[in-house]
Image (tube, rainbow, N blue to C red):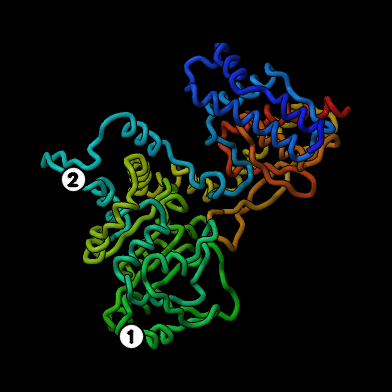
């Protein structure tokens, strides 16, 4: 180690000195002393690392006061909320990275009411004794779907694993090769099945699986016939699959239960609104499927949850599985789900009030009107060197739903002479609130389909300020 590096290391700020400076700052009053000390240590360790990595030629040692200010900023940063509201201008309705489904107003109100005090989460008010937490939504789910019984866990992968662990542990579950999908976060159906304790039996080929393939594979160890809806991709062309009614008939004849994982989960006939057909929970149950699993935070439009519906004789076994307790949902999720499901009692209300359904089904004319308003607001900025254009485009359902067809939309594109689209996109992510956009052909694209009416003015103001800050530095 050379002498300069040794000298720099000797002159590193002392932790105790930094602590004394922090404790004298009014802004640091009341903070945990160990937290202050950790902040000081991390500042000093960063300086030490820079020196050791060879940056000493351009390195300037901060004074103790400057280092203390860095520690203060670090402590104050702990108080900044990391989970923040963002404006989704991407046109991806169920954006996995942006929290998927926004909740409807009633769902949020239910969460506030239940979370702010005590509730009858597991208390039967009529009988005055311990109750079951699912009772608050079981009747709703059954009324909407036609199921005999219902259970809710914390996400759909958990729902599938719980069903498999209950009905097929150490036994065989038969699945078509074309349905062994990978879901978000690189989790795959075969991996979920393995963890559940069920033994996977693949049948057919990627593009063609017949009912005869299932029947040939049924043996004394077969516990389930499993159908997985490929909600996040489609296989087209030379294809064939066994439909659920064929599987139900085969299951009855061979006394094997049938499980269908619908993934996105849908209660509405979306083709009425010009969208591609998405299998509904009602269709699956009406066909006689024994157990159906689906998500709460995708096409259903509620909070993250894994919903299990079906025949009571199977659901009762699933509810008694000890794994069910490990996967159960809390009172806030239950409240939000109840507030969402109530809307489905009147389908017109669901389409109007549940943000995901409203965004999916809103006519193009309404989107064009909103795009026109945003275009006008942006034009009023009068920032020189900025091109603002209206154009046609496509929104996407996202979240592994409706993968094969874009939804017609109207876009507002912005291109500036004094900054690149990538620079502008990065700057908009640093706004408060952050604005998340698409980039194409060196312009940012704003899609009003995923923006609230109240977002339009806010976006135009923040965008105007951002563009002006770029222009002022690059005349």
Q: Quadrant of residue 289?
A: bottom left
Please tell me which residue is depicted at 40% across the width and 56% down the height of the picture: 267
351, 218: nearer the viewer: 218
N-terminal of the pair, mark 1 or mark 2, is 2
User: Where does the image place residue 386, in percent across and percent down from the top left?
Assistant: 81, 34
**CA distance for labels 1 and 2:** 40 Å
Task: Name the residue that disc number 1 marks.
Answer: 219
Task: Name the residue that disc number 2 marks.
Answer: 131
Q: How many marks?
A: 2
Q: Secondary structure at mark 2?
A: loop
User: Where does the image place residue 326, in percent across and percent down from the top left?
Assistant: 32, 52
Q: Please, is residue 403 above or below residue 204 in the view?
A: above
Residue 387 visible in rendering: no
Mark 1 nearby-residue class (10 Å; few <14, some 14–19, many ≥20) = few
Please tell me which residue is depicted at 57% across the width and 72% down the height of the picture: 235
96, 327: nearer the viewer: 327
133, 94: nearer the viewer: 133
Q: Secondary structure at mark 1?
A: loop
Q: Quadrant of residue 199?
A: bottom left
Left or right, 429 with respect to 313, comes to right
Please tell me which residue is depicted at 53% across the width and 46% down the height of the picture: 359
Left or right, 195 with respect to 412, comes to left
């Amino acid at each position: 180690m050379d002498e300069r590096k040794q000298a720099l290391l000797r002159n590193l700020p002392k932790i105790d000195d930094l602590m004394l400076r922090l404790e004298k700052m009014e802004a640091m009053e009341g903070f945990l002393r160990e937290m202050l000390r950790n902040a000081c240590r991390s500042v000093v360790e960063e300086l030490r690392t820079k020196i050791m990595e060879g940056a000493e030629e351009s390195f300037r040692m901060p004074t103790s006061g400057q280092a203390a200010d860095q520690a203060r900023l670090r402590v104050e940063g702990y108080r900044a909320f990391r989970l923040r509201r963002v404006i989704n201008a991407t046109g991806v309705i169920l954006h996995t990275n942006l929290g998927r489904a926004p909740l409807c107003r009633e769902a949020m109100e239910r969460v506030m009411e239940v979370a702010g005090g005590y509730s009858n989460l597991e208390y039967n008010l009529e009988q005055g004794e311990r109750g079951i937490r699912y009772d608050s939504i079981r009747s709703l789910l059954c009324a909407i779907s036609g199921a005999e019984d219902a259970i809710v866990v914390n996400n759909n992968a958990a729902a599938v694993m719980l069903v498999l662990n209950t009905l097929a542990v150490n036994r065989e579950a038969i699945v078509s090769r074309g349905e062994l999908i990978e879901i978000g976060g690189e989790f795959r159906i075969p991996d979920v099945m393995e963890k559940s304790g069920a033994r996977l039996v693949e049948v057919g080929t990627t593009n063609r699986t017949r009912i005869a393939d299932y029947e040939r594979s049924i043996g004394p160890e077969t516990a389930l016939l499993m159908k997985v809806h490929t909600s996040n991709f489609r296989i087209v062309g030379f294809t064939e699959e066994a439909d659920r009614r064929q599987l139900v008939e085969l299951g009855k004849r061979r006394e094997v239960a049938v499980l269908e994982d619908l993934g996105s989960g849908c209660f509405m006939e979306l083709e009425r609104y010009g969208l591609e057909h998405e299998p509904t929970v009602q269709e699956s149950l009406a066909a006689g499927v024994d157990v159906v699993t689906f998500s709460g935070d995708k096409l259903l439009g509620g909070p993250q949850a894994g919903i299990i519906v079906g025949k009571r004789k199977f659901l009762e076994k699933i509810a008694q599985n000890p794994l069910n307790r490990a996967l159960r949902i809390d009172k806030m999720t239950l409240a939000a789900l109840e507030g969402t499901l109530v809307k489905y009692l009147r389908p017109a209300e669901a389409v109007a009030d549940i943000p995901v359904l409203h965004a999916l089904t809103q006519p193009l004319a309404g989107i064009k009107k909103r795009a026109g308003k945003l275009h006008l607001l942006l034009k009023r900025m009068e920032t020189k060197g900025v091109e603002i254009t209206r154009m046609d485009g496509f929104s996407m359902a996202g979240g592994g739903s409706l993968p094969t067809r874009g939804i017609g939309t109207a876009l507002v594109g912005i291109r500036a002479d004094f900054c690149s689209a990538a620079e502008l996109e990065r700057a908009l992510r640093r706004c408060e609130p952050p604005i998340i956009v698409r980039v194409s052909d060196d312009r940012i694209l704003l899609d009003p389909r995923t923006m609230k009416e109240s977002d339009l003015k806010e976006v135009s103001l923040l965008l105007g300020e951002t563009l002006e800050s770029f222009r002022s530095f690059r005349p």
